[in-house]
Image (cartoon, coloured by chain):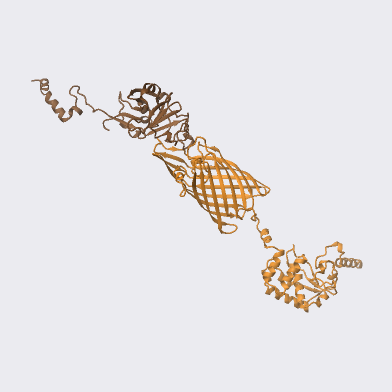
Amino acid sequence: MSSFKLSLRFRPLLTIVFVLTGCGKYGLDWRTGEGAEPPPTIREYSLEGVKLISASISDGRDPRSFGQDEYTVSPTDHLLLRLLELKSHVESVRLREGDLVELKVTLAQPAHAEDAKAELQACPVLRNWTYLATWENAHPFSGQGRWTSSGGDYDQPGCVQAWKVEDGTLRFDVTRWFRDFPLGRGKNYGLLLRSRVPIAVLGETSPSRSPRLTWKENPRY
Amino acid sequence: MKSPTIGLLAILALGISSPLPAWSAPTKVGNGDDGSDLEKLTPIQDGPVFQARDQAVRLLERLDIAGVENLGMLLPEVKNAQLFMAASDVAAATEADQSRFHSDLGGRIYARTFAEPHAATRFFPVALKLEESQLVALQIHEALHRALPARIRENEGAVAQITLSITAPEASRDRVRQVVAKYLPPDEVRVAEDPHPIPESARVRNPSLFAYTYRRYNQARDTVFFPVSGMHSLQSFLYPFGSDRNPLGIGIEASFITNERSSLMGPLALSARMRLWSGRGFDIGAWGTASLNTLSAEELRNSPIGRDLATLGLSMRKELAFLYFENFLSVSSSGRSTQTIGPYSYSYSYGALTQVSMHAGATILSRLKLGAYAEIGLADHYRVEGTDLEEPIDSGRIRLLSGGPEITWQEKEFAVSVTGRKILDRNQDVSYDNLGNLMGQGSGQGFVSGSLSFYF
């Protein structure tokens, strides 16, 4: 009896053994002969750094600029977004082909989702900013806190529009921003949301639909 | 040949000894410079005049006259002066000669002397009719003409008063001192000795201070650091210790902060102070101050400028007739403050601050001072760390050049002043807020202040 005939006879038994021992999950794939990885964990973090900077608000401590249920993004109202603890997760983010780092923003009026998809842009912020940021200043601690351009300093070429709309939630592919800034430069200045027309989005106080970042996590984490 | 020579010498001798015309030399009080009483003088070695001198010496020793300022030479003049008796009386030639100490009712001179030290006293026969007490007074009177300072020894009225104070039955050393001081004030002596006397306007003369000051800050329009629009302060610096040239004291300064929304209790500054009038005529001040936010409002304590700091300072001022110059040097300690805003907290770190300033100006009408000043402030660092800051904000070393005008109307016991301050140059885009010294440099881009001060 040849070894080939022997392997065919014992295939069912081998299959049972693989399943019982878990080898089918982590060990050899009997059809391809390659090592099989477990499915990645999808991480989703609500952004606690949400700050509205508006041409009509000069005081960084104005309560209209933070802690709101929703914000209106317009040509004179930009929304600064940042996950403060992102740098502690940088090494865990999986960036294989097809893996995305996404920004999820939920519209206050889902009926206008298609308009919002065409108008809303998420742009990488280029300056260190703080909770007390305003339309003119990234921070008030010194004269160096002044934005170079009113409304915030952001990377125009790096601005992206939402690539998908799901149930009133816009999904922005910010993988390039993640590679260039938090991963590449070690700088997490967050993102800036802008629009040419007024669009209302839910704020950080929403329990399940607040702005958030999502990515796939490497298995060993 | 000889006789003409001898004759010529005799003529010269007579010419020297002959009486000088009254118009050729001034006549001194009580002295016979007309020369008529210089002839036929006999030394007095006994008799009532000689005995009166001993009485006078004992009187002066009993009064301890040597310890009276400006009469230190009186006793030697009485004791050691040569006494002569003229052969005949002479009449009083001037009004001063006719004083009660110099002549009798008939105008005959009792005695004369030259108003210069170690001169002899010349008595005339009419003096022998005087009683012993009168002779004692006469001896002392003539000696005073020689012993007193030059500016008063020929003042017959002053010499007479001093003589009476010595020879009066109730005479005492204190009484003599009082009379002498009336004509020779003690301050005149000290002024002549001090090359840099303390002027009336010097701060060291009235170092204690009570003042009210109001500052109006110039804030940048788009700054939301910590809004302070103005500050009221009350200063009370009292100098109860030390001396007139080196007073020591303690200072208290309370402040009240105003902004567009509210008014807040500000820092409290406690200080130890010293003033000194130097040997070269400089008015020097030194102080150590602790600015505390212990009593400040909660909003101020929870702010970037709510820190405690200590300052050591030194000032040196020189007042001339029409100008004044003053330098200031101070060093303030480093420190930290924290601020919590909503879910985030910030930590502010201030470096040590060194500050020097130069003030100069003109004094007009001895009261109005118009001047200006320039000030350089150097801070080690200014750093902010926050829970929502991606990275600390660090300004590095800060250099601020400031300046402004100062106008003061100064009276002896009060002053009104107006001062301005503005940032003239800086190495970074910073403001006074970044120094964290509200009681010192203040806030914003500068200020205008007015103050009313009382000195005592």
Q: Where is residue A192 in the image (x, y as percent from the top left)?
A: 41, 28
Residue A166 seen anywhere in this rendered image of the structure: yes
| B442 relative to A83, above or below | below
Q: In this view, does B47 lie to the left or right of A155?
A: right
Question: Which quadrant of the rendered structure holds the N terminus of chain B?
Answer: bottom right
Q: In which quarter of the image is residue A21?
A: top left
In the foreground, A135 or B48: A135
Q: In this view, does B121 lie to the left or right of A147?
A: right
In the foreground, A198 or B374: A198
Q: In which quarter of the image is residue B182?
A: bottom right
In the foreground, B111 or A197: A197
Q: Where is residue A94 in the image (x, y as percent from the top left)?
A: 30, 28
Question: Which quadrant of the rendered structure holds the C terminus of chain B?
Answer: bottom right
* Residue drawn at the location 36% of the way across and 30% of the way down: A211
Q: Chain A is drawn in which colour?
A: brown
Q: In this view, does B6 lie to the left or right of A151?
A: right
Q: Position of residue A114 (x, y in %)?
A: 37, 21
| A76 relative to B280, above or below | above
Q: Where is residue B108 in the image (x, y as percent from the top left)?
A: 84, 72
Residue B117 seen anywhere in this rendered image of the structure: no
Q: Is residue B110 left or right of residue B185?
A: right
Q: Which chain comes out orange in the rendered image?
A: B
User: Given the current orientation, which residue lies at the most extreme bottom position?
Assistant: B47
Q: How many labels does the image show?
A: 0
Q: In which quarter of the image is residue B11?
A: bottom right
